[in-house]
Amino acid sequence: MDTRTATAELGWISFPANGWEEVSGYDENLNTIRTYQVCNVFEPSQNNWLLTTYVDRRAAQRVYVEIRFTVRDCASIPSVLGSCKETFNLYYLESDHSLSEGRGVEYWTTAPFLKVDTIAADESFSQVRSFGPLSRGRGFHLAFQDLGACMSLLAVRVFYKKCPSVVQNFAFFPETLTGAESTSLVIARGSCIASAEELDVPIKLYCNGDGEWMVPIGSCSCKAGYEPDKANVCQACPQGTFKSFQGAGLCQQCPPNSLSTAEAATLCGCRNGYYRGDVDKPEDTCTSESLCVFVCVCTSVVLEWSPPRDTGHRGDLVYNVLCRRCHSSERRTCQSCEDSVAFSPGRRGLRGDHVEISKLRAHTAYTFDVQAINGVSNKSPYPAQQLSINITTNQAAPSLVPIMHQVSSTSRSFSLSWPPRTAERHHPRLRDTLLRQGRNPCVCVCGLRPGTGYLVQVRARTVAGYGAFSKEMLFHTLTDDEYKSELGQQLSLIAGSLVCGVVIVSLVAIAIICTRYLKESVYGDKLQQYTTGGEANLRPDQFSGEAPTVTFPTMSDGHSSPGVKIYIDPFTYEDPNEAVHEFAKEIDPNCVKIEEVLGAGEFGEVYKGRLKLVGKKEFPVAIKTLKAGYSERQRRDFLSEASIMGQFDQPNIIRLEGVVTKSRPTMIITEFMENGALDSFLRRNDGTFPVIQLVGMLRGIASGMRYLAEMSYVHRDLAARNILVNSNLVCKVSDFGLSRYLEEDTSDPTYTSSLVRIPVHVWSYGIVTWEVMSYGERPYWDMSNQDVINAIEQDFRLPAPMDCPLVLHQLMLDCWQKDRNARPKFPDLVSMLDKMIRNPASLKTVASHELFLPPSRPSPHALLDRGAPDLSSVSSVEDWLSALKMTQYRDSFVGSGINSLSLITQLTTEDLQRLGVSLAGHQKKILTSVQSMRDHIDDQSPTESL
């Protein structure tokens, strides 16, 4: 029932006759509606009833009534004593049929109505009530009782709640009505959809009192020969594919030498002449008994075979080797291998029984076909005999170490070095003794015998395994007499060095003791120190006598140290799922709870949520989702960011919690940073932080970038908008969408940002420093890209932000050196910032707020400095505040009567405090502009020459 749609008379029964009255009216949209009203407030003892027509409940056990009404306030009606009411009562009467026909008023006055509630207007004139359980009849009448109110019934809507039919977990659940109580749970039994079979039984869902499904139990899955799609439908495997098992897997391409001619195949039959063994699986290749292939998987392959049993009684048998590169492990789409793939001794017309294939791609799926051909093969209607083999390569085997050099020697040890190789660990060995080593291309072998020769070999290891040992090279230790003679020659030098060392250590100790008494050192004690190991004791696998000890130094030239991993580019993987599963943890989506939307990213929405892992407390996280309708490239790029973040473990790098890839939507889950992006956070807190705190934030960013540099990793979009800040003001580098691996021979890299094409790395860090010290101001303001490029090429540089310490602006200028080799490295930047924190007095000298150029330029050129507004364009107080970005104080200025620029020039610090400008940074910014305005007025004043 819904009276809002009624246009004719409702025909409800009212009694007594002078009670409820039906009238026509209009709703808020000027549509005609039928209403009932009553207003006998001046007559005592009112008992007016209004009975609706019969309502069929349609098997509903609980019914809801929505009532829209108006009630007049009794206090607004004059001369009304206690007879006026502001409430009315709602009743219902169950029945199998309509009771309104042929019955008099006497029947209704004694009918067994059940009261639902007393209705009163609170915050609105719309109320919803429910009643139940209903079980005594097929329907009911509603009744409204008035006891002396002045009111109108504008609309009555009767409805019930239900859970709609749904397909979930490949099971169909029918439409289900809610239970008799609002807290009732009604069980709905499910049935598997077409081409699906029960996986867990029983299959059921619960319908709650609000008409929502919850608590799924059991599920179905697509049976063999069918694969699931995104719409919860099981589709038959097309011809040429098969699926041999029940479950969520997809159909696979038929293995080589097999085919399927019908849809929904559970097995691909072998072609003529090819067979599967009794223990072979459905996905195994069909093979013939005439060929046998042995494979070595890395980035090269060796194939060997035996000749066919039947050679056709001919002596011109040759072999062809065909190569195909596939785009995924399912091998649905393949193409011929590149010309760069090498075959030795060749790929066609082979008379031998083997071939070596090299220069293959790493982490790539390949299919090789070996064909047996003779002089009459082109006459046969049947394809040539062949055998196919599928492989997936991994990383290339490490290269051979070409040579070793002896760096030094004593009577008990010698040091060796060799040319380095990127991302390889080296394992030197003496004859019959294996020495385990790290990434450094040098080794010190100790515990040897005097005057003895040793044969040494070195081999490299990567994730692909070990490379071959180098050629044996002979190295000798000194005799005791030779060593003593050499030691005597160096004695004077050693003694002098010791004296210098003692003096230096003493000076350092005195400096440390003095520094501890400085008040400013409190902040420095809170710095996070990150170190990596620089020495390891290495034990041989087999050695008679005392075991030699191998040590290696920590590298200080910016390359990887032994305690730091090497970054692996996920784009070298053919399948993005392999990369993300190697570097990121898969999280059960039931452990993730989404709470609110934070914004929208390149690939979809970003949410705040909570993560509950087994054995841990629930904690907040940020959740990136992949939008629906994505392309395969978008999914690859989306997952690549998780594969990148998963390789990092450093306090100033955003931490990856895990990924959700086995259900929809695909999600990347990271730690939650309460204060968001650094640039917007600084703008919200303009002028509130002391300089020492800003330096601490910059130190954290530099520490994170130092870690990335040590992993040979390039962040190609370093900017304040991509730095996140947590509740403890710790800054963390994020957004790795544009990043790539830094090759060994990388030249000065460049990128095109929204502002300008300039060298990245340290240059970008200088820009971030400028953004931090200017509290999130846009670098280069509103200049066009081309204008910025021209200015940089002419050696122009950004001016110091307001109140910026001179040492920090000098750090920015060092980062912006034209010669990339003259710029500091990130370890240098961390050290410089540490010194500033330990010596806060160095931050007290403020840089001039003017345009700065490198010393190579004889004089600066005029470049617009947006630190102060253009006073020639300012005509009012509002314009002036807007140019200073201080519009938040506009009402204070107007309310104090400061409405002209002449009054602005008279402002003092005390005036600003009275106006509510309490932040020191805001006061200085306004007073600086006031002084500029005074100078501008003086310049415009007429002068008279004598």
Image (cartoon, grey):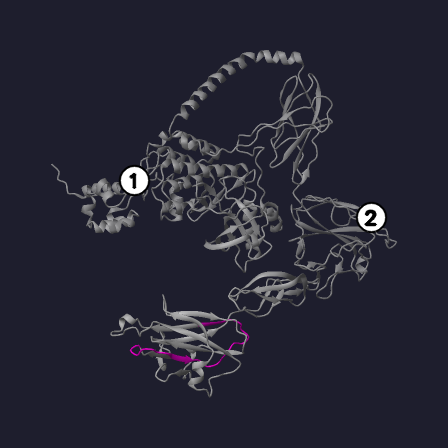
Question: Residue 782 lies in magenta, yes or no?
Answer: no
Label 2 sits on residue? 306
**Secondary structure mostly seen in the magenta stretch:** loop
Question: Residue 42 lies in magenta, yes or no?
Answer: yes
Above or below: residue 190 compared with residue 492? below
In which quarter of the view is residue 767 placed? Answer: top left
Q: Residue at x 46, y 86 (%)?
A: 103
Residue 306 locus on image (x, y percent): 82, 48
Residue 567, disc: none
In this view of the protein, can residue 780 be seen by the observer? no
Left or right, residue 78 beside residue 474: left
Residue 83 locus on image (x, y percent): 31, 75
Residue 368 locus on image (x, y percent): 73, 51
Q: Residues within 10 Å of mark 1 (few under 14, many from 20)?
A: few
Gap in angstroms between the C-alphas marked 1 and 2: 87 Å
Left or right, residue 865 beside residue 388: left
Q: Point out the tag, 1 or 2, that comes first from the N-terminus.
A: 2
Residue 606 locus on image (x, y percent): 48, 53
Q: Residues within 10 Å of mark 2 (few under 14, many from 20)?
A: few
Disc 2, SS: loop
Label 1 sits on residue? 920
Q: Do the CB atoms of the residues marked 1 and 2 lie less than 8 Å apart?
A: no
Above or below: residue 19 compared with residue 379? below
Q: Nearer the viewer, residue 826 or 90?
A: 90
In which quarter of the view is residue 25 placed? Answer: bottom left
Looking at the image, which residue sits at the far left?
Answer: 946
Please give the range of residues in magenta.
Answer: 41-65
Quarter in which the C terminus is drawn: top left
Q: Amino acid at mark 1?
A: Ala
